Image (cartoon, rainbow, N blue to C red):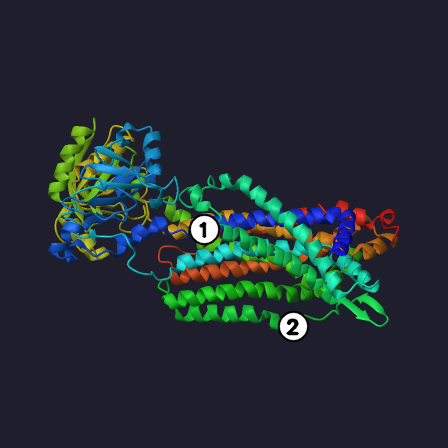
Amino acid sequence: MRVAWSVVRQSLTRTKGRLALITGAVAFGTVLLLAFAAFTHATFDRTAESWEAAVHDAPYVSDLPAAAASSHIKMYRPGIDDLAMIGGAQVEVVYVDAAGVSNPAQLHGITWPGRGEYLLSRGTRTLLETSANPAVANRFGRVDRGTLPRELTNGPDDLLAVVGADLSEVADARSLASFEPAGASGSDPNFILLLIGLVVLLFPVLFLISISAALGSAQREQRYATLRLVGATTRQVRGILILEALVGAAAGYALGAALFAVAWPLLAEIPLARGRYWAESLAVTPLAYALAALAIIAMVVGANLWGLRRIEATPLGVVRRRRTLTRPSPLSFAGIALACAIFGYLYLTSEPDNATGTEQNLFLIALVIMMLGLVVAARWLIYALAGLSARWARRAPMIIGQKYVRAHSGRIARSVSGVILALFAGTFFITTVSEVDFLGAQVPTVAEKMPSTTAVLANLSPEQAEAAARAIPANVPGARALTVPYLARSWVVLPCESAARAVGLMCQGSGVVGVNFWDLADAPGAVVEAPDATQLAETVQGSYNAYISGEASAVLLELREPGDIEAVRTVLMNAQLTEPGGVYVFAGGRGIAVAVDKTVETMTYLVYAGIALTFAVAIVSLLVSTYAGLLERRRSLLTLRLSGMQVRQLAAMLVVESVLPLAVIATLTTAAGFGTGWLLMEMRSVSLDASFSPVLLVALLAALVLSLLAVLALVPALRRVSEPANNARE
């Protein structure tokens, strides 16, 4: 071991630059691996969702025996509660009724609020305290019982309120004696998709570390062959190799872990999905640190041990064996062909917008096969494209560059694998979430065309509408209320003069107009005119297949200021005229809030952050791989310089070798990602379609431009490597 360390020490003193580059690359990869572990831990921590799942799986109050009522609390979660909107933010409200329960269910030490009392999450409390409108102060009740425990939310920005209410008349209320999960839930395709996305983000990091470990492999292999020639055994050479590799791996891991420890508090300030994660959720376990260290050491040592295969000992001496150039097999396309076959089968057999769980799982399998197939087929594509380009080339840099690409198609394919995966995953996810912002922002409806001082309350009984029409003007100065019919839970029936004044809709006659505030402003049936309410009902039944049952009312409000809508919501929330979440509020100048699956929303934000991360890692990998190629080609580059080629011609050759194959493969990869995302939307999304996003082109161009800049940044190194004065020993 003393001899091995002596040799390693001498080697390191002569290759400080290479060691520094390997250490830096491994440190960068370590930071990304640990950050990946932190965000994976936070994303897959289901503590904040487990109690909500227990509420969802609990039996209805009506299904519970009367004898058990004394030990069960009642809870109700409306899908969207329009009265819980504060400004443009939607607060999730859980209503609880623990009246008469002697031993209520325990949840992280909460004392359940009584009627008129409430508990707020940290995010909701901050929202209320920072609001400029004083009308929101008492939105959720009269008595503030404190802040909810951290375990009930994913982060400090989550908007949640637990409000005490009378749920005795709410048919959909749930009855709970415990918040223990009922059993293992099935796999959510959205969650599986998110897991695949996170794994894809990890691939470029692993490629970076393995490529960095192989930096300068040709020179190391020559040294190892020399050691064998002077009498070193294979075991001694292997010990020297492992020790040399461990130095770079250990130094890089230690540096990366230290940098991550410094940057860790900043991770809690990065907003994802609906806000930031709790810092405690971003903790990296000792097991994750150990796995990251083992993975890095295994990749670095493995990449170096792989080079020993090329050292061949014969009776005549020891040489470094060169690989024979072989033509890649067309079987490289087997993975892509299999994935395309599965996609074609799903397209032909699955029901649009209603794919089964089996079909979705089959799609995810095909997605993974496609990703791996693109990486495997990259070598054949690069080999074929280089041969075709060299055949038609007329200039020396192009010919030499393409010949080199053809001879080293496998190594070049590995160097661009990170970019391939980044582009495919980014394009796929951008396509799948291309319309999430459309839903998450707000749907453009008729309400957006109303004046901002107008509001409509819908889905009320006649008695509730009359009570609201009395309570709002009494508590909101300057407010005027008009009770009107509400047909088929869709059309608010307004007199034409009121519609013209308050809503901005002009009638052709002097009758009534039915306004569907749910619908798009230009959709058929959004505005229906009739001489009177009776004929309007006949029109919507005959022309739009509306089903009218019972008598419902709405309230047209004309407010003094736009901000008075917050006071209206507060009055209605405290009055509790309807069951929670039962009243619809259409505010002028605003659309309708739409509930978006949390996992999909998380995936949306991860896409935009992740694609930038993977591009950065992939570009660094390309940079390191290209630099490694320069070191290995020192003699050939010197020969080209001595034969009369200038540095700018060598730089052009370098661009041809690195960027041109990447440009073609990136274009094909982007097309594959878009097609895969489009198929997923066709299979399972009812409310979303796949649309071509300009972000796709921006991502593709950004990857190519950054790759070009990275290669051009190596021109000084190219000049230094090929300078005759620096190659006197050659």
Q: Mark 1 is on which residue type?
A: His
Q: Which residue is mark 1?
A: 41
Residue 713 location (% of width, % of height): 71, 45
Q: Describe residue 47's horizontal placement relative to residue 470 as left or right.
A: right
Choose between 245 and 692: the one closer to the eye.
Answer: 245
Residue 595 location (% of width, % of height): 33, 49
Q: Quadrant of the C terminus?
A: bottom right
Identify the disc placed on residue 329.
2
Compare marks 1 and 2 and give the one earlier in the sequence: 1
Q: Describe residue 305's horizontal placement relative to residue 147 as left or right.
A: right
Q: Residue at x 46, y 41 (%)?
A: 268
Q: Describe residue 704's horizontal placement relative to residue 162 as left or right.
A: right
Q: Are marks 1 and 2 in contact (CB under 8 Å)?
A: no
Is the residue marked by circle 1 packed among few (<14), some (14-19), or many (20+) residues within 10 Å? some
Choose between 312 and 81: the one closer to the eye.
Answer: 312
Q: Quadrant of the N terminus?
A: bottom right
Choose between 252 and 103: the one closer to the eye.
Answer: 103
Q: Residue at x 60, y 55 (%)?
A: 296
SS assignment at label 2: loop
Choose between 225 and 339: the one closer to the eye.
Answer: 225
Q: CA distance from mark 1 to mark 2?
A: 41 Å
Q: Residue furthest front?
A: 2
